[in-house]
């Protein structure tokens, strides 16, 4: 399995690499095609390596967040498995944005789709929200729900451990449905 992953924190990239290396015996051979520090680097790596089987991306990164990278990759690249990794939850997103938004989830996702069109076209519009993650925060949407809505294979909570990575690979081999690897 060919893998590319992204996280802005070096220690988290090391943790992901260590966890993946520990899985070689059970799920190998695993080939790490590259590591990125942000969503833009991730997209560049994926575009240079179209044969990638699995993309793991952090949610909150500089330059381009993981949600925006997910939307771009799903629209512009043929990637089957993308898993977003984060310690975010609906509670942390809600705390980040105190403004109450009165709209149902469908309406909020439709607003997020407007941002997604700019991300897919790699278009930055002055004075508009140009990040899926910022849109998610402003609309007080559950990031796990947004990750699933935009077609990710799954969501895994930090910290990354061998056990969680093993569970992810087990599920990727068994199911086509969305995988949510929680705290354990």
Image: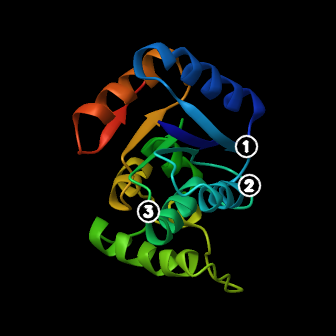
Can you identify the residue that label 2 sits on? 62
Q: Mark yes or no: residue 82 visible.
A: yes
| 14 vs 86, nearest the viewer | 14
The residue under the point 56% across, 20% down is 19
Q: Measured from the top left, where is residue 22 in percent x and y? A: 54, 15
State the separation of the CA atoms marked 3 and 1: 24 Å
Q: Measured from the top left, where is residue 26 in percent x and y? A: 41, 15
Who comes first in sequence, dot 2 or dot 1? 1
Residue 81, compared with residue 30, is above or below; it is below
Residue 21, compared with residue 86, is above or below; it is above
| 25 vs 10, nearest the viewer | 25
Q: Measured from the top left, where is residue 74 in percent x and y? A: 44, 64
| 111 vs 149, nearest the viewer | 149
Helix, strand or loop at label 2? It is: loop
Q: How many other residues sit within 10 Å of disc 2, few (<14), some (14-19) or many (≥20)?
A: few
Q: How many other residues sit within 10 Å of disc 1, few (<14), some (14-19) or many (≥20)?
A: some
In the image: residue 150, left or right of residue 47: left
Q: Mark yes or no: residue 137 visible.
A: no
Q: How many other residues sit within 10 Å of disc 3, few (<14), some (14-19) or many (≥20)?
A: some
Give the label on residue 150, or none.
none
Can you identify the residue that label 3 sits on? 78
Can you identify the residue that label 1 sits on? 8
Mark 2 near mark 1, Cβ–Cβ under 8 Å? Answer: yes
Mark 3 near mark 1, Cβ–Cβ under 8 Å? Answer: no
The residue under the point 39% across, 47% down is 144
Give residue 106's quadrant in the image.
bottom left
State the separation of the CA atoms marked 2 and 1: 7 Å
Who comes first in sequence, dot 3 or dot 1? 1
The residue under the point 51% across, 49% down is 52
Residue 167, compared with residue 99, is above or below; it is above
């Amino acid at each position: 399995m060919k893998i590319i992953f992204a996280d802005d924190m070096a220690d988290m990239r090391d943790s992901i690499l260590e966890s993946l290396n520990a899985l070689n015996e059970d799920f190998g051979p695993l080939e790490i095609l590259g590591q990125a520090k942000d969503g833009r680097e991730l997209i560049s790596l994926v575009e240079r390596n179209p044969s990638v089987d699995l993309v793991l991306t952090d949610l909150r990164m500089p330059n381009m967040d993981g949600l925006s990278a997910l939307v771009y990759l799903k629209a512009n690249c043929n990637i089957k498995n993308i898993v977003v990794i984060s310690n975010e939850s609906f509670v942390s997103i809600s705390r980040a944005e105190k403004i109450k938004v009165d709209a149902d989830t469908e309406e909020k996702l439709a607003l997020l789709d407007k941002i997604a069109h700019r991300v897919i076209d790699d278009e930055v519009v002055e004075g508009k929200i140009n990040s899926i993650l910022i849109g998610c925060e402003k609309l007080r949407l559950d990031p796990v729900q947004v990750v699933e809505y935009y077609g990710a294979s799954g969501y895994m909570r930090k910290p990354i451990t061998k056990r969680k990575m093993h569970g992810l690979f087990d599920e990727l081999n068994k199911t086509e449905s969305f995988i949510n690897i929680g705290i354990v």
